Image (cartoon, rainbow, N blue to C red):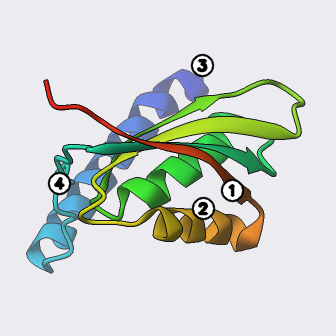
Amino acid sequence: MKINHLVPIVIMSFLVACESQSKEDTKAGNSTPKKTEISVIPNKVITAEVTGMTCEKGCGGIIRKNLKATGAVAKVEFDFVEDAEKQVCRIFFDDKKISETKISEIVNSVNEEHYAMTLLRSEGLTKK
């Protein structure tokens, strides 16, 4: 019975603590600005093989995050096949902002050089 009375108290304490922490962060100038999505208009796509990937969400996500952080990559797609040694990816980017070599260097350096990218082909994208 006493536990039933404690649950609302614990929840209220948690909410009050979170609210006051949020106000303190804002007053101290520690508020995190909202992420603004950088719009990239790709003019080129490369198809490559990546070794070292064990999953699409984790491995693919960290590769995608590092490439998109350049502000020159619009999209990264993976054709992930479970237990395959090499995974195929397509990277859509603006070649005026980043080179194929730099993309490869970024992928190869992610996660303490756990991944290795080999370029298969490069194609220009036509404007619609």
Please state which of the two labelled residues, at mark 1 or mark 4, is closer to the viewer: 1
Residue 59 lies left or right of residue 37; in this view the side is: right
Secondary structure beneath disc 4? loop
Please state which of the two labelled residues, at mark 3 or mark 1, is closer to the viewer: 1
Residue tagged by mark 1?
Answer: 117
Residue tagged by mark 4?
Answer: 34
Please state which of the two labelled residues, at mark 2 or mark 4, is closer to the viewer: 2
How far apart marks 1 and 4 lie (CA) works out to 32 Å
Disc 3 residue type?
A: Met
Secondary structure beneath disc 1? strand
Q: Are discs 3 and 4 less than 8 Å apart at CB?
A: no
Residue 2 lies left or right of residue 94; in this view the side is: right
Q: Position of residue 122 (x, y in %)?
A: 49, 45
How far apart marks 2 and 3 lie (CA) works out to 57 Å
How far apart marks 2 and 4 lie (CA) works out to 26 Å
Disc 1 residue type?
A: Met
Q: Are discs 1 and 2 less than 8 Å apart at CB?
A: yes
Q: Nearer the viewer, residue 91 or 8?
A: 91
Dividing the image into 4 quarters, which one contains the N terminus?
Answer: top right
Q: Are discs 2 and 3 less than 8 Å apart at CB?
A: no
User: Which tag, 2 or 3, sits closer to the chain's start?
Assistant: 3
Residue tagged by mark 2?
Answer: 107
Residue 26 lies left or right of residue 78; in this view the side is: left
Q: Residues within 10 Å of mark 4 (few under 14, many from 20)?
A: few
Could you say which disc has been placed on residue 59 in the image? none
Q: Position of residue 78 (x, y in %)?
A: 59, 32
Q: Residue at the far left: name it.
A: 27
Q: Residues within 10 Å of mark 2 (few under 14, many from 20)?
A: many
Secondary structure beneath disc 2? helix
User: Which tag, 2 or 4, sits closer to the chain's start?
Assistant: 4
Q: Position of residue 74 (x, y in %)?
A: 31, 44
